Amino acid sequence: MPTNLPQMRQTLPATALVVTLFVTAAAVTQEHVTHPFDHWQDKPGFVLTQQDDIAFLSDLDAQRVTLAIHEISTTRARINQLIDQLGLNDIATPPNTLHVIGFRHVNDLRKAANLIQTRSSALGLYHRPSGVVLYLSPPITEQFREQMYNIGATLLRHETTHQILDQRCQRIARRMPVWLAEGLACYFESNKSVNNARADDIAPTLAAGNFVKTIHDLWSPDAPANLTAEQYAIAWATTNHALHNAPEKLGRYLRALHERPPADFRKHFEETVMTIDESLAHTILTDIRRLACDPPKGE
Ligand SMILES: [Zn+2]
């Protein structure tokens, strides 16, 4: 599921930048799997930090390494909690070591992506054959200190979600439709109760009334592997709604995926979790608009 990415922009405001930088898991089927760690652990400047079952290889400064490990650890705890909440513990594999490489320079990330034959435009990716996450933690300038940190952290949380779900619920992760895999990654990429960056991306859909059509397009067997910002946003909004309003049903749906993939994902999802029609789309969009304008206190 590689995702194309626009060129990295230098001086955009945070929101615009965040909106364009998300990347998907990039799975490449290869007979011979190149493990990115093998290539990067001896590079000058790259240091391996091992802590809390996380192997973090990077050329980042110590403070950012600490923050990154904290983000991975927190994301893992949230996903473990979800697996528990969805009643999937008995079919989940115990957590194991997570392998992540953080890059300070985009050219190094691109080189690493090329080595594993992944689209070189990605700024963050989960390489399924090796189980490794690669992401850019961009240079922090004084002017954009917070924004630059947030971009790296968001990429890290997004890709780590793919990694953790693949590690703990491999069959489910590999069988779920792309919109749900991305919806979950977009859900966990934010550490707020509402992913405001994704909520902002719903605007064109609101204007065009395209919610149902877009999600149904994503459901088709020839759904694009590279999602647009709008498609990510709608995948997120739908997943967010299912997680909050139908967690038991979603748990049963995922369990069924574990047993065997359905012939028709759309039919199976709509039969077991919820029907995505105009009225549900209206409810979801109304909720998103309200939450995005009025985030809960304490967030
Ligand atoms: Zn993704």
Image (cartoon, rainbow, N blue to C red):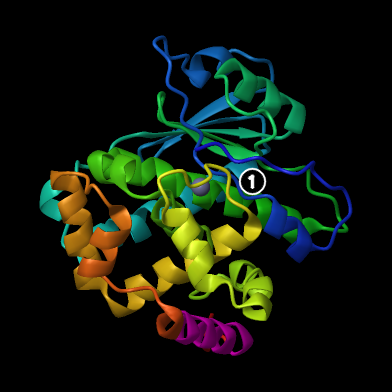
Q: Residue tagged by mark 1?
A: 63
Q: Position of residue 17 (x, y in %)?
A: 76, 56
User: Which quarter of the picture shows residue 16?
Assistant: bottom right
Query: What stretch of residues is rendered in magenta?
Result: 281-294
Q: Decide whether residue 197 is among the magenta residues.
A: no
- Whether the residue under disc 1 has CB within 8 Å of ligand 1: no
Q: Nearer the viewer, residue 173 or 51?
A: 173
Q: Position of residue 179 (x, y in %)?
A: 44, 55
User: Which quarter of the picture shows residue 219?
Assistant: bottom left
Q: Is residue 2 left or right of residue 152?
A: left
| SS under mark 1 | helix
Q: Position of residue 91 (x, y in %)?
A: 13, 47
Q: Quadrant of the C terminus?
A: bottom right
- Residue 172 to residue 125: above or below: below
Q: Nearer the viewer, residue 28 or 43?
A: 28
| Secondary structure mostly taken by the magenta-highlighted segment of the chain | helix
